[in-house]
Amino acid sequence: MAKDDLAQIDGKVIDAGAGGIYKVKLDENDIEISAKLCGKMRRFNIRVVVGDRVTVGVSPYDPSHGLIMYRHK
């Protein structure tokens, strides 16, 4: 599945777990999902800490997991 097929949803990082897995609370419906960094964020060493506002790409097939696509300033 391409990144264009993912639904873009804004949220807030509430927990940083081991192995690069983050818990993100979505703004739209207050659901917590697990997300990991996308490849470009890993490549350019963009750090994400607890409390950051992020945009998450969520697959329509499995809405409990996602990719962190963008970190807002």
Image (cartoon, rainbow, N blue to C red):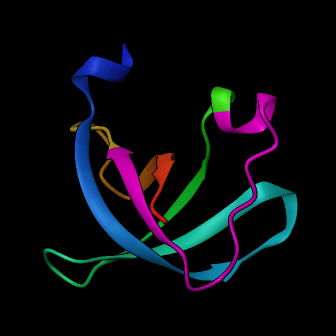
Q: Is residue 1 visible?
A: no
- Is residue 5 in sight in this rendering? yes
Q: Quadrant of residue 8?
A: top left
Q: Residue at x 36, y 13 (%)?
A: 2
Q: Which range is magenta?
A: 41-57
- Residue at 23 percent across and 22 percent down: it is 5
Residue at the spot x=45%, y=48% of the render?
A: 66
Instruction: Pick the residue in front: 58 or 13.
Output: 13
Q: Position of residue 65 (x, y in %)?
A: 45, 52
Q: Position of residue 43 (x, y in %)?
A: 79, 28
- Residue furthest toward the front? 73
Q: Is residue 17 left or right of residue 12?
A: right
64 shown above or below 22: above
Relative to 70, say whether 61 is above or below. Answer: above
Task: Indicate whether residue 25 is drawn in magenta.
Answer: no
Q: Is residue 72 left or right of residue 28?
A: right
Tell me residue 1's x, y (percent): 37, 14
